[in-house]
Image (cartoon, rainbow, N blue to C red):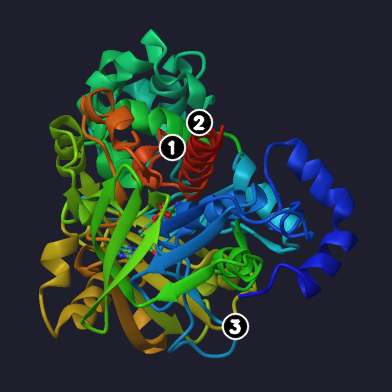
Amino acid sequence: MAAPGGNARRRFLRMSTAATGVAALGLHMPWATSWAMGGGPPSGRVVIIGAGMAGLAAAWELEAAGHQVEILEARDRVGGRVHTLRDPFSGDLHAESGAVAFSGTYTHANRYIDALGLKRAEWVIPDLKPLYHLRGQRVVLDADHPNPWPYDLTLEEGQLGPLGIVDRYIVQHLPEGFQDETRWQDPDLLALDELTLAQFMRRNGASTEAVELIADTQWFGSFVHSGSMLASAMSNFGLFGGAVPFLLAGGNDRLPQAMAGQLSAGIHFGHEVVAIEQNESGARVRARKDGEPVTFDCDQVICTAPAQVVRHFDFSPALPPAQRAAMEGIDFADTLRTYFEVDRAFWFDEGVTGTAMTDLSIKEVAAQPYSQARGPQRPVVLESHIRGAGSREIAESGDGLLEDVLTQMEKVHPKVREHAGEGLYRHWGSDPFARGAYSVPAPGQITRYLTRLGQAHGRIHFAGEHTSILSATIEGALRSGARAAAEVVSALNNKMA
Ligand SMILES: Cc1cc2nc3c(=O)[nH]c(=O)nc-3n(C[C@H](O)[C@H](O)[C@H](O)COP(=O)(O)OP(=O)(O)OC[C@H]3O[C@@H](n4cnc5c(N)ncnc54)[C@H](O)[C@@H]3O)c2cc1C
């Protein structure tokens, strides 16, 4: 990791104008501190569990406040669920196995991206006919077939189409404040936690078939019947509604890598935390490194591992029962993503998009946007992305998985087999350090669990996307890390006062 002097300091001088602006917005540069600039000694020792977006944001903020940070990371890389796959793809082709889309509304992420000088890649949607596979039919949307939906819709719903239905039965009914994460406990918003998105649509007049059309054709559709409407309102509509999505040029893992590169914190890879103890004089984190026990003593701990992992940690003293119930109760969704490099974007020949929403077992077929943007003659990564139900079953189907996915993809793109090379898949449910893709709270779970998931237990503070109302997002994870860091700074300041 870069030392706080040297390059970082030179960089600070170059970036001083930007850094001042960023600090004024509440985001600190770790190298722009009195400590990093040669001031007083560090005032507190903090162990952060996890080098994902929440852990890195927390480390960044704590170093800015002059504290000494050690990060324990079970994997051999930073980024957690922001992970770019490059092998076995040719040239500079790559695919995201975790987070894909950033949004213009991601205030924390955008500040880091700008401060670190990272380049954005536009989310290009080529001017091609939208493609679907629904209820046994391959559906192409064009001027001759403006209402091709094989659903028993009302006349108005048929004319509206999926986007019009989303606007008519969802967006127009969202309560004021859904774009402001601090307002999630406003009564009108909190009431949405009692409903699924399907129930919300029905309440606003949608037919059952319109709900199914949305479930089958929208990126958030997999959780229409299971997720809390409040989570959907704040994360999906609040963050993405109307804002422009984008990726990072070269891969989204550029962000965690660049953040880690600017920290002076030691990042201890291959350290799997199993227990956290605390008493009146400090905290001790117990981990395993190559099967051997190791311990780290500190003043405060920030735990950013996903709740599905944390629920297996030993806490001494034990977590309060209500907090343990929250860790054990919050629902996580699974995902399975399967990738094939195709030698060219052959779907341009037919004038249809590479990306298609389907109700087949493979669900969404997606051409990685940056690669499709390069036109019809260049190689592209084509994936199938199953969110939620069905992921585990297919992931555990054995050796034939890639072949089965390709067979299903042929229903969408009949010529895919002629163009596809080697494939690979990524199943987040089998990942021991994630045990799922992201939290998708069921109705009632935000009300019951959210404040408890992020509540400090003595010297132990909790962050991570699952502690944020902006669940399942990079932005929620970053903001939760900054929030936990502020708690730690306050605890250390109180101790020294
Ligand atoms: C398939 C998928 C698609 C997604 N799409 C998007 C999207 O398009 N846009 C978006 O904004 N977000 C998306 N997300 C969500 C986003 O990736 C996450 O919300 C965010 O990255 C979570 O960050 P985190 O720091 O909370 O958790 P993590 O990234 O999981 O970080 C926690 C870290 O803790 C480590 N750890 C776990 N257990 C231990 C242990 N015992 N000891 C030590 N270390 C441990 C992990 O290895 C990890 O590095 C997606 C996620 C997935 C999986």
Residue 342 lies, with reference to residue 409, above or below; the image says below
Q: Earlier in the sequence, mark 3 or mark 2?
A: 2
Instruction: Report how far apart the C-alphas of labels 3 and 2 lie in the structure.
Output: 35 Å
* Left or right of 324, for residue 463: right
Instruction: Report how far apart the C-alphas of labels 1 and 2 lie in the structure.
Output: 9 Å
Q: Which mark is residue 478?
A: none
Q: Earlier in the sequence, mark 1 or mark 3?
A: 3
* Cβ atoms under marks 1 and 2 closer than 8 Å: yes
x, y percentage for residue 82?
46, 63
* Left or right of 480, for residue 434: left
Q: Secondary structure at mark 1?
A: loop
What residue is rendered at 74% in x and 54% in y?
114
Asked if residue 143 can be seen in this view, the reply is no
Q: Nearer the viewer, residue 490 or 279?
A: 279
Q: In the rendered image, which residue does mark 2 sit on?
A: 238
Q: Quadrant of residue 156?
A: top left
Residue 250 lies, with reference to residue 229, above or below; the image says below
* Quadrant location of the N terminus in the rendered image: bottom right
Q: Earlier in the sequence, mark 1 or mark 2?
A: 2
Q: In the rendered image, which residue does mark 1 sit on?
A: 470
Q: In the rendered image, which residue does mark 3 sit on?
A: 378
